Amino acid sequence: MSLILAVNAGSSSLKISLFQRQANDPPRLLLTSSTSSISSPPAKFNFKVIDVPGSESTSSGHKESAEADIRDHESAFGHFVETLARYAEGLRRSTQVPDEVRLSLELSQIRNVCHRVVHGGNYVEPVAITEQTYNHIERLSDLAPLHNGAALRVIHAAMAVLPNSRSIAFFDTAFHKHLPAHVAAYAIDQNVARKRGLRKYGFHGLSYAFITRSVAQYLREDPSKLNIIALHIGSGASACAIRGGKSIDTSMGLTPLSGLPGATRAGDIDPSLIFHYTKNGGRILSHKEDAAGEVHISDAERILNTEMGWKALAGTTDFGEIVRKAFPRSVSEKPDDDEYALAFDLLLDRILHFVGAYYLVLRGHVDALVFAGGVGEHSVELRSKVGEAVSCLGFAAVDERKNEGVEEKKGVVVDIGNAGQCGKRVLVCRTDEQGEMARECSAIEDYW
């Protein structure tokens, strides 16, 4: 049995999936793990078996716990490997598990470890980790400070804990390699831009690749003919215009800061705002040179990455809480101020800006509007409000019964549009970045 470990390191989380490579079929998901609250211990650890024969005969098939010994991404990865090893040992000792399973689910069978890396710079294909590629990713950390550093720490841990496995980086930027030159360029001196790599890269590419393939299958359409507007809305949020299965525009740019607001990111702002926002900058609007203090790039990037977004507007990074307080069940539950409604309405407004723009970019030839990501997949209210607004563009009206019943529906893609209408589809896609990495890895013969 050849195994693939797919690892997705977030700023304070670590999601891992274990797959079995299959010769003529997509990789089979065996088990998953997630660790959250890494930066605010105790971390929460989850280990769940999906499809391992005989798993019902072991006591460690599903585990949820708070783990004080998880201090960072490296220890989180180490904890997963130790849990997996104990689980495999339990299978080996079980007399009810087939021999081929007892002997094959071993750490030594993990041939490849796939790492989601947010920023790949000029890398447009997966790369095996070497000293050269590791250093390249490290140099890009300033452009994705919430994620690249975490990915590098997990890569380092994987190479130490699983020395016989190959670590491979899969880049979120790679899906956007087909961006037209005029879309990727900024209105700056292009000599400086080319020398320093200053252009739009785009992110969430693994998610958009999964969405494109899954929606094409659902609609029974050739991916090369698929036109969609995809919304990956989570703690990090972005939009993407996809024509013929390829990204032709996306909301994030040189870094994940631009575009839609997220849990701690501001999204698009006037570049000058940061100088007036910080305590070191001018406290009043003034054209006097001595009115503004010095703002270091590192300070500005920290503030824009970690202190803005929903956190700044509503005091929470939990969009579910924002929705509950913006749409209370009774008047008595309505807060005295409208900070939660402001956070919700601001995100809604920015989403509509990009949907409208991408509708024009695609010249109205749109097969579907697709919601994905933690918020996109779970927020009934956001989908309802967006759907209500875009119906004027010919999208099928959102069926509220279907919209509210998404959680109960099986399958990767769920249609929430009114079935009686012939308009453009409104869909929810349960995106899977780990699954996308495993699929791509399985298809690259050089890795096997």
Image (cartoon, rainbow, N blue to C red):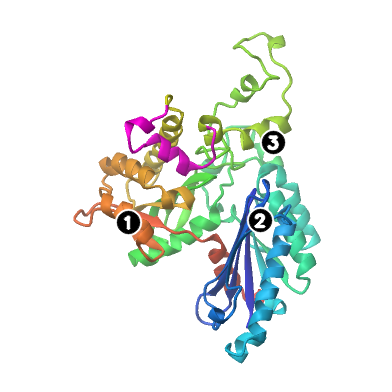
Q: Where residue 67 sits in the image (x, y, percent)?
A: 68, 57
Closer to us: 182 or 45 = 45
Q: Amino acid at mark 2?
A: Tyr
Which residue matches tag 2? 123
Tell me the SS state at disc 1: loop
Examine the rendered structure and indicate whether residue 89 appears above or below residue 304.
below
Q: CA distance from mark 1 to mark 3?
A: 51 Å
**What is the distance, in whole Å, between disc 2 and disc 1 at their CAs?**
40 Å
* Residue 366 x, y percent position in the rendering: 34, 51
Helix, strand or loop at label 2? It is loop
Q: Nearer the viewer, mark 3 or mark 2?
A: 2
Image height check: is 235 above or below 271?
below
Q: Mark 1 or mark 3, which has the lower sequence index?
A: 3
Total marks in image: 3
Residue 4 x/y as whole percent: 63, 72
Q: Do the residues under discs 3 and 2 have CB atoms within 8 angstroms?
A: no
Marking on residue 405? 1
Task: Report crowding for label 1: few under 14, some 14 to 19, many 20 or more residues within 10 A (C-alpha).
Answer: few
Report the side of 366 relative to 344 (left or right): left
Q: Which quadrant holds the N terminus?
A: bottom right
- Of 428 and 118, the residue lying toward us: 428
Q: Residue drawn 68% across and 69% down?
A: 83
> Is residue 176 among the parts visible in the rendering?
yes
Q: Is residue 421 magenta?
A: no
Which residues fall within the magenta stretch? 315-335
| Mark 2 or mark 1, earlier in chain | 2
Three-letter amino acid code at the position of disc 3: Val
Residue 192 - label: 3
